Each structure stands twice: as C-alpha cells, then as structure tokens.
C-alpha cells in the first residue's frame, strides 16, 4: 500500500528493451510521469497493481511498455488484452501502443470496438494479433462467437475501470476475465475507487500493490471556481465566464442530452462557435465532432458525461459545469479534462440553489474549502464571440486509398500558395480524411484540393462549418 519511490525518473533507469527506449526518445518522452514512475518498476517485475490514475496521466505508456517489454513477436497468439470503456479511448490506446512498438518488427495490435464491421475484425483475428484493445461489448461478442481466444493472455489491463462499471459493463467484464488464464498479470486503472472496483480487485487480482497517483483534480495547476446561478440567468453567467477568461478551447458539461443540444443552440445564437456531443449522434458525426474539437476548429464543445467518455484532447483551457453532476466522482472526471501534461487548467461551475448539496459533496471528496462566488452579470458585447483559429476540410479518401499525411501536405504546399505552418492536424481514417487549416488559408486549400489528383485519384473536398 505504500507508494513506490523510484531512484530516477528517467526511462533508461528501467529494464526496458532497447527498441522501446528508441521509441520513447523519438516520441520525446524524456521523464516518466508520476503513474509511470510508480507503476513500471512494479509491473515490470510481474506484479499486479490497483492504480488510481486518470486519462492524461501517462498510464497508457505505463501499461503499454509493460506489455511490449516481454512480448514474443514469434508467438502467434493474443498475449495482452486491454479493456476500455469507449471506442474513442480504445482507438487512442491502440495508437499509442503502436507508436511505442515502432521499432519492434511484426507486432500486431488489433482494436475491437462496436461501430466497425464485424467481418474485417474476424479476418484480423485469424492473423493472431499479439495485443488486443477493445470495448467490453465487442470483445464479449467475439468470445461468444469463438473468434477470439484468450488462453495465452498473460497481461490483462482494465483501463478506466470505474467508468466501465458505471456504464453497466460489470457482467461483461467478469465474463471476459474468466476467459483469461488464472496465471496472469492484472493491471487495474481507475480514477476513483468505488466499492465495485475494490470487489473486482479482490476477486481477480493477486496481492496487488495499491498506488494512489495524485489526481490532476487536486493539483495546483487546475484552478477551481464556483458561481451562484439560477435557471433564469445561467446562460448569462456562462457567457460572462467565457468573456472573462476568453479560452481558445472550452468543454462544457450538461447532465442531459436535451440540455446539451439546447445550450449549443443558445451559444451559437449569442455568436460563439459551438458543437455538441451527446447520445443521439451517429458514430460518424460523433467522430467528426471530436476531431474538430481536437484540431481547434470549434471553440466550444457541449457534452454529456456518457458522450464525453474517451475524449483525450490536449490543452483544454476551460472546463465548465453548466450543471453540477449528481455524483461527486463525476466532477473529478470532468475536471481532469483540463490541466494535463503540466499545463495550467481552469474549471468553472455554476451552482443552482437546488444543487448546493452536490457542491458540498464535491468539497468533501476533494477535501478542500472553496467558496461559491457571486458573479455580477456583465453587459453583453456585440463584438464578443469565441471563434476557432482553424477550419476543418473533409476529403473522401483515406488509408484504403493509400493516402498519407505527407501526400496531403505535399499537394497543398506544392504551389507555394500555402505554407506548411498554416497546416494543423491531419487525421487519416479508413475511407476519409480531415485536415485542419488556419482560417486564412482554408479557401486556397479548398481550391487546390478540388483541382488536383492525389495518388492518381480525383478527390472530393468540402469545408466543415
């Protein structure tokens, strides 16, 4: 139960294979984060851990390095399984593991999530992936079909376990665990420790070392503010917060999808650029919304808790609780979206009179004493609006068409009309791609891409407003 105190925060102090150290150097990972420094010496020794750590703490690299360090690429079977609560998080975990395995030849990592064709996954499973990352529902589906065999799984990771339990996946998770060998290493990561997590740990882990990594919600780099509000003036109070801090990237939480949709419409009416993320969105629209928020082509994302699970966006400057959550632990999850990787963060919460008991629960959980302030309603500036620095372009070509980010960059910069500095993040998906551009260059980019061929193929391009 005592925290591990490593002698050095350098990855080179660990017994890691040379290929992993090479990948870490390429990725610019110089020093270990707290969760990496505390967990890796234990997990590399083959022991189980129960770690309290949030998304953004560096835990993916922590368990990814452990899995890859002893992986046998010549053994054609699934040696490690990572279970995540959402498709978005599973995708992010898979990407990072592949990056860490860059200099390890022939490593196969497969993502098993809903919303993707079952047939393609069945074909990939026949090629015996070494590492599988997936969501409980789709993993369970393949186990019951007999297309997934976990008899050689030596490392099992439950990532964001508390979220999976709150989403109702307990039965699925227990079924999956029972399909794994009894002799295995089990790594359990959770932002909070509800009773169900402790039950899972006691039932399926072998003398785990408990690590409590200081929550990002409790660190000094996140400033917390609470403001009195009523249902009648809540929108005005929100606009006053946006006006005071003028963040480039804001994530606003609502408790219900209808409220999220309405708030998005209200913010647009005021003059801000806003998108919403909620359960009524189709997977295509959900993916597109997340990409636009991550690449800074929308200023505000209004989301519900369930829809926001799996969001991993760097440098979210402001998180707003338009409504306080019913559970105090959910406040920690929301708050942990800002102040990541050493950046300063800010959370602002509007507290209705009927929600003051929720505020008290949060204070008790965080063990802090913060007062609810009164914010004078500011006069609305007709010129004040939050508008993103980037625009997203959509093209109908992706990995299936052998298109790479380099092809797109080359096509856009060939005429010298557009500089590479004006290009933002490029997301290449299976059949489509998204390109973030500075607003000032988007019109020229749209014209260039509509007139050329990439890899001999005429593409269709459109601007997402």
Image (cartoon, grey):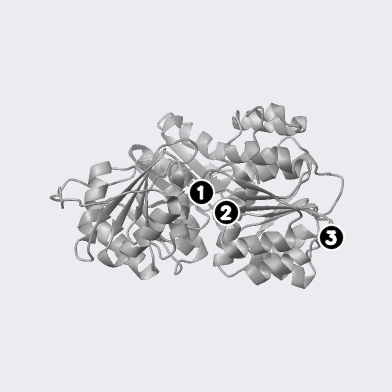
User: Of label 3 and label 2, which has the lower sequence position?
Assistant: 2
Circle 2 Cα neighbour tier, 10 Å, few/some/many (<14 / 14–19 / ≥20): many
Q: Nearer the viewer, residue 37 or 176?
A: 37
Q: What label sits on residue 152 in the rendered view?
A: none
Q: Nearer the viewer, residue 181 or 274?
A: 181
The answer to whether residue 271 of the structure is visible from this angle is no
The alpha-carbon separation of the residues under discs 2 and 1 comes to 8 Å
- Pinpoint residue 293: horizontal percent, then vertical percent: 42, 50
Q: Are marks 3 and 2 in contact (CB under 8 Å)?
A: no
Q: Label 1 belongs to which residue?
A: 312
Q: Residue furthest left?
A: 379
Q: Are marks 2 and 1 in contact (CB under 8 Å)?
A: yes
Total of numbered circles in the picture? 3
- Residue displayed at 19% across by 65% down: 232
User: Of label 1 and label 3, which has the lower sequence position?
Assistant: 3
Is 395 on the left or on the right of 199, as rendered? left
Circle 1 Cα neighbour tier, 10 Å, few/some/many (<14 / 14–19 / ≥20): some
- Residue displayed at 87% across by 48% down: 75
| Local secondary structure at mark 1 | loop
Q: Label 3 belongs to which residue?
A: 151
The alpha-carbon separation of the residues under discs 3 and 2 comes to 25 Å
- Pinpoint residue 34: horizontal percent, then vertical percent: 58, 37
User: Of label 2 and label 1, which has the lower sequence position?
Assistant: 2
- Residue displayed at 58% across by 70% down: 168
Q: Label 2 belongs to which residue?
A: 89
């Amino acid at each position: 139960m005592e925290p591990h105190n490593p002698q050095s925060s350098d990855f080179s102090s660990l017994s890691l294979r040379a290929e992993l150290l090479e990948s870490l150097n390429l990725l610019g990972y110089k020093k270990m984060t707290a969760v990496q420094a505390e967990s890796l010496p234990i997990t590399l020794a083959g022991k189980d851990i129960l770690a309290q750590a949030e998304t953004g703490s560096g835990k993916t690299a922590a368990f990814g390095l452990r899995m890859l360090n002893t992986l046998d690429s010549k053994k054609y079977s699934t040696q490690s399984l990572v279970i995540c609560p959402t498709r978005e998080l599973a995708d992010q975990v898979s990407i990072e593991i592949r990056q860490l395995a860059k200099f390890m030849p022939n490593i196969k990592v497969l993502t098993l999530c809903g919303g993707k064709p079952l047939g393609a996954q069945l074909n990939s499973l026949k090629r015996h992936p070494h590492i599988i990352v997936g969501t409980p529902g789709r993993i369970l589906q393949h186990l019951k079909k007999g297309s997934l065999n976990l008899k050689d799984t030596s490392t099992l990771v439950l990532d964001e376990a508390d979220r999976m339990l709150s989403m109702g996946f307990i039965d699925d998770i227990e079924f999956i665990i029972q399909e794994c060998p009894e002799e295995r290493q089990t790594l359990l990561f959770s932002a909070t420790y509800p009773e169900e997590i402790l039950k899972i740990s006691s039932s399926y882990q072998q003398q785990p070392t408990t690590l409590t990594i200081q929550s990002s919600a409790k660190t000094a780099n996140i400033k917390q503010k609470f403001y009195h509000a009523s249902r009648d003036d809540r929108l005005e109070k929100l606009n006053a917060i946006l006006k005071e801090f003028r963040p480039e990237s804001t994530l606003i939480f609502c408790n219900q999808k209808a409220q999220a949709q309405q708030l998005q419409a209200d913010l647009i009416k005021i003059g801000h650029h806003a998108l919403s993320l909620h359960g009524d969105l189709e997977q295509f629209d959900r993916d597109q919304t997340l990409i636009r928020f991550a690449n800074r082509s929308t200023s505000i994302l209004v989301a519900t808790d369930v829809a926001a699970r799996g969001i991993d966006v760097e440098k979210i400057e402001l998180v707003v609780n338009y409504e306080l959550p019913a559970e105090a632990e959910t406040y920690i999850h929301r708050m942990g979206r800002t102040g990541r990787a050493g950046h300063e963060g800010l959370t602002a919460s509007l507290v209705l009179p009927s929600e003051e008991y929720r505020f008290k629960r949060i204070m008790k959980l965080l063990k802090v004493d913060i007062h609810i302030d009164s914010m004078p309603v500011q006069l609305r500036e007709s010129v004040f609006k939050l508008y993103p620095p980037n625009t997203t372009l959509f093209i109908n070509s992706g990995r299936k068409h052998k298109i790479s980010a380099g092809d797109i960059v080359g096509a856009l910069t060939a005429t010298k009309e557009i500089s590479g500095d004006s290009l933002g993040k490029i997301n290449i998906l299976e059949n489509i791609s998204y390109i973030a551009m500075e607003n000032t260059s988007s019109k020229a980019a749209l014209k260039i891409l509509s007139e050329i061929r990439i890899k001999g193929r005429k593409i269709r391009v459109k601007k997402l407003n």
